[in-house]
Amino acid sequence: MDKYDIPYLLDGVRKMPFHSDNMAKIPHSYEMRFPKSLSDESHKIQKKYLDNNLGKLEEADSKKILPNNFKMWLSNQLHKYHAKSDIFNQDNWVNSIKSLIPPQHVLSCGFLINSSIFYVRPPQPNPLEISAGATSHGNFGDTDMLCSRGAGGFAGDLYNQIAVRVYTSTMNWKLGVYSDSSVAPDDLIAPEIAASIDNSYTLHSITEFALTDSTPWIACRPYTDNNTYWGTGGNKAYVLQSYASAFPNPITSIRATNTDTLQCKIGHT
């Protein structure tokens, strides 16, 4: 299961029944008899999709490639049609999806009204940059991994490049990307790379990944103390981390925080 499988999963959603106040549209072949009950037929189609795809949906969500708006639709469906199902006593993931919408907020019709909102965004043409245009630079020590929080992303955006801007000499760095949890770096969504970084601010290849929220954290660990550009007014977390060790996943301990974010960015080829 990877991001390329998601359009096929969501294609089943786009073929779901459509209902409004005065119209219903249900997948139907010319040879089939008209259903006796539109609501029963809709229920049957939706239940078949959920029964056939719950395992795939759970896997996609665990890999953070399932669009959030799709999960909200699925939460509504689980409330509407599976509220008393035994699956809620056996599957923690289904329970977590169901809890996204309180029972009192479930749509009365329970049907998908606008299937066009479910899509996987293409790679973004412009880098997502932190502390763009920074003019200040300085040394940040050599005991920590420095995580700077970005903004302006979109869950599902794809990236496969990363960079940090340094002021002086070429040095080896480790770079990676974390998801955001209550203004703190959390899960590693782009495994770290080791790269030789100079002052050209060049983007380096990293395993392609999808953002899980709009505010990713770019993690940077120099081999030793290095003069780096930084800006103010953001969020930076210091995570005690040796250069030789793999980036933690998830981050469980933050040594300190401040607002001096490194100038860094993620992009896509």
Image (cartoon, rainbow, N blue to C red):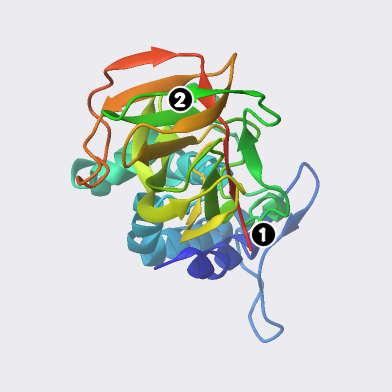
| Residue 135 locus on image (x, y percent) | 67, 24
- Quick one: which residue is furthest to the bottom in this view? 31
* Residue 132: % across, % down: 68, 31
Q: Is residue 96 above or below residue 157?
A: above
Residue at which label 2 appears: 102
Is residue 231 shown above or below 189? above
User: Label 1 neighbourhood size at 10 Å, few (<14), some (14-19), many (20+)?
Assistant: few
Q: Are marks 1 and 2 in contact (CB under 8 Å)?
A: no
On-image quarter of the N terminus = bottom left
Residue at the spot 35% in from the left edge and 38% down from the top edge: 221
Left or right of 50 on screen, residue 145: left
Q: Nearer the viewer, residue 205 or 80?
A: 205
Q: Is residue 73 left or right of residue 186?
A: right
234 sits to left or right of 187: right
Alpha carbon separation for disc pair 1 and 2 = 32 Å
Name which residue lies at 75% across and 45% down. Answer: 20
Question: What amino acid is labelled 2 in the image?
Answer: Pro
Is residue 16 depicted above or below 248 in this figure?
Answer: below
For label 2, the crowd category at 10 Å Cα-Cα, with few meaning under 14, some 14 to 19 and many 20 or more, is: few
On the question of residue 155 being in view, the answer is yes
Q: Position of residue 117 (x, y in %)?
A: 69, 49
Instruction: Using the rendered view, name the quadrant where residue 234 is placed.
Output: top right
Q: Secondary structure at mark 1?
A: loop
Q: Earlier in the sequence, mark 1 or mark 2?
A: 2
Q: Nearer the viewer, residue 165 or 226?
A: 226
Q: Nearer the viewer, mark 1 or mark 2?
A: 1
Q: How many marks?
A: 2
Tell me the element at label 2. loop
Which residue is label 1 attached to?
A: 122
- Tell me if I can see residue 83 in this picture: no
Between 90 and 110, the one lying in front of the other is: 90
Under mark 1, the amino acid is: Pro
